[in-house]
Amino acid sequence: MIKSVMCCCGSGLGSSMLVRMNVEKTLQKIGVSGVSVTHSSLSDAAEGAADLFVVGKDLENFVKHLPRVVVLNNIMDKAELETKLKAEFEK
């Protein structure tokens, strides 16, 4: 069960915060509640830090060791985010 989502980018400031806001909106849209969503730098992406990690395609190689990861081809594409989050929450 997914109770926490961490959105990561290189520095943990710009794009990860943007993705976090989109994740929060998307979870609300698909009717998922009770999930904490944070944003951070890639260096904080470690097993146990969150149940699910969301990163852009450029960081895919850095998170291969994590058990559950959503890789976004386009971090601005809300439809892609919704499709991939729905799939994870339906597992």
Image (cartoon, helix red, strand yellow):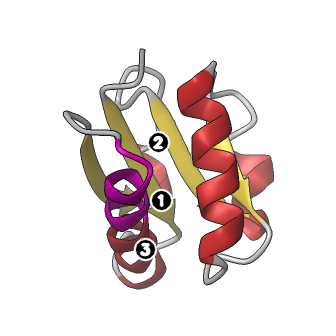
Residue type, numbered disc 1:
Cys
On the image, the x and y values in percent for residue 18 come to: 40, 80
- State the image quarter where residue 82 is shown: bottom right
Q: Quadrant of residue 33?
A: top left
Labels 2 and 3 touching (C-beta < 8 A): no
- Against 52, is 22 above or below? below
Q: Which residue is mark 2?
A: 45
Q: State the image coordinates of residue 6 (x, y, percent, origin top left).
A: 39, 47
Question: Residue 68, percent across and down?
Answer: 61, 28
Q: Residues within 10 Å of mark 1 (few under 14, many from 20)?
A: many
- Residue range in magenta is 23-31
**Mark 2 vs 1: CB contact within 8 A:** yes
**Quick one: quadrant of the C terminus?**
top right
Measure the alpha-carbon separation of dots 2 and 3: 12 Å
**Distance between the alpha carbons at the discs numbered 2 and 1:** 7 Å
Instruction: Give the answer, above or below, for where 52 lies relative to 8.
Output: above
Q: Along the line of sight, which residue is nearer the eye, 40 or 4?
A: 4
23 in relation to 43, above or below: below
Which residue is at a point 43% across and 61% down the rendered structure image? 26
Residue, disc 3 = 11
Instruction: Determine whether, in the image, residue 91 is placed left or right of residue 45.
Output: right
Residue 87: x and y, percent? Answer: 67, 36
Crowding around mark 3 (Cα neighbors within 10 Å: few <14, some 14 to 19, many 20+) is few
Residue at 58% x, 46% y: name it.
Answer: 85
- Residue at numbered disc 1: 8
Left or right: 7 in relation to 86? left
Q: Residue at 42% across / 60% down in the picture?
A: 23
What is the secondary structure assignment of the residue under circle 1?
strand
Task: Please tell me which of labels 2 and 3 falls first in the chain.
Answer: 3
